[in-house]
Image (spheres, helix red, strand yellow):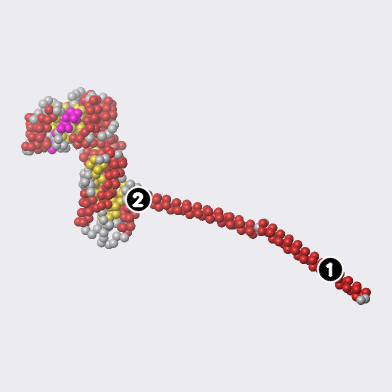
Amino acid sequence: MNVSAISFGFTEITLSICTVLLIVILLCQIIRIRQSAKEKNNENVQQPSKLEKEYKKLEDAYQQLKMANNKLDEKYEELKVSEERNKKLAYVDYLTDLPNRTAFTEYLEYSLSVLKKGHILSVMYIDIDNFKLINDSLGHSYGDELLLDCTERLKQVLDTNDYLARFGGDEFIILTENVINMWEYEEKINTVQRIFAQPFILALKEHFVSASIGVAIAPKDSNNAQMLLKNVDLALYRAKSIGKNNICFYEPSMNEQIMTKMETQSELHKAIREGQFELYYQPQVDLDADKIVGFESLLRWNHPEKGVITPDKFLPLAEDTGMIGTIGSWVLREACNQLKSWQDQGFSGITMAVNLAARQFKDPDLVNMVENAVRQSGIKPEDLELEITESVALDDITYAIDTISQLKDLGIKFSLDDFGTGYSSLNYLKYLPVSNIKIDKSFIDTIIEDKSDKAIVSAIITLARNFDLDVIAEGVENTDQVSFLKEAQCNIVQGYLYSIPVSKKDADSLLHNMGKDEIHNRFKNGM
Ligand code: C2E
Ligand code: CA
Ligand code: CA
């Protein structure tokens, strides 16, 4: 082996060692890099990237949105339920569960819109008579019970062509479609009315109620829902005004009548404002003394265009509308003042009779009003006589006894007007603290030719005497009647034979001429 060979071998070994070293170093470096890469990787896992952060935010927002959405869903469900409830409230009557006025009107509108040519539909409007009385006397819960009973009874007599609704407080309404013939429909109306024939058991007692019914038919009476409802209302109004428990079909003339009524009503308001009322006076004559012993005040309306209007033309309306209160208190003051004026002129021993309408008599302020009128005029209370009819007195006899007694305690007298026309039992006369009875003109009219009227008038006079009451005969028109009344011992009379009701001025003249000639010769026809 030579040196060069040895040195070559050494270099080779060195090279090999260096190579191995290099490899080792490289390996170490790779391991380190990997290690650091791995660490970096790990670090990356622990610290999310920006994107991941955004993603997370989005995820959170989504979750929140989802929750909010769920809440919205819940709210929506709640709203839906309450909307349905409101809708029910708007269309269903809370007490009877029947369709209400809105539902009925919409159904009627729809039915009319699809009503085929030649077909008929009918509306029956039912109003319970005196429902207020049940409500007032037994309380509202019994009123409700009555309405529920009516609903059940009505349902039982109706069929699939009928749509029943509660239209108002005590009002029901039935729409009947496919009316084939009126005869059958009228039968249905009668059946409906008959459901009221059986008593209603309320508060363990039987109560009888009746109903008034108005009917309107489409297309005859209108093919417009509002018009048809207005017309059926007029028909019901008529049914009630002719005495309840009645059935009325709509007629076009009802429109005119209601227009006239509305006109009269506004004219009455004007009449009150402008003082168009005047009192007339009809003398009451004592047959024995042959002199005027009193006057009955009778109201007249001096209409600027229509002339003098008598009370029968406007007092019922004044009562209906409550205007009688204002008119009545004016009448009372005017009559008291007039009497005072005559008394001041020296005419003593005359009384003044004033008529009280039913509504006035029931006014809780009546006693007060009468007391004031008497005091302010300065007349003596015993010179005033208030007239009420038997029917007004007996409508609520306890109230009547109490009210009449209060006024009697003040000295004021009461007369029973139109006596004999109302009640057959006279037993109540014992209890009513009245001073006079006025025999109705209808008996006086026929006392000469009708034997039984003669007997009735004689009996009334005897009865009155037994009860210590004075008797006035009304509507005396001839001397035969006077002879009969004198014989029967009825001394005070009133009628055209002596005088028609006259103005204040003419009544003045009657008083001034009193006692000169035979009374009936001069008083006749007003003078
Ligand atoms: P009434 O109280 O029965 O009055 C008597 C009516 O008979 C009066 O009618 C009178 O004019 C009439 N009359 C009297 N004598 C005769 C007669 O011999 N023959 C005929 N055919 N009729 C006679 P008027 O004045 O038209 O009064 C009608 C009714 O109006 C009265 O009937 C009364 O109920 C009511 N009334 C009159 N004025 C008032 C008032 O101021 N207030 C109230 N609430 N009602 C009044
Ligand atoms: Ca009268
Ligand atoms: Ca009368």
Residue that numbered label 1 is attached to = 18
| Quadrant housing residue 180 | bottom left
Q: Quadrant of residue 486?
A: top left
Left or right: 127 as drawn, with respect to 22 = left
Q: Nearer the viewer, residue 158 or 333?
A: 158
Residue 515 location, x and y as percent? 13, 26
The residue tagged 2 is: 92
Residue that extends furthest to the front in the rendered view of this protein: 1
Q: Amino acid at mark 1?
A: Cys
The residue sitting at 69% across, 59% down in the picture is 42
Query: In which quadrant of the rendered image does the N terminus lie?
Result: bottom right
Q: Percent position (x, y) of residue 395?
A: 21, 36
User: Residue pushed farthest right?
Assistant: 3
Q: Which residues are magenta?
A: 427-442
Spatial distance from mark 2 to mark 1, Cα to Cα? 105 Å
Question: In the rendered image, is residue 208 in sight?
Answer: yes
Compared with 338, 190 (above or below) is: below
Residue ID at (59%, 57%):
58
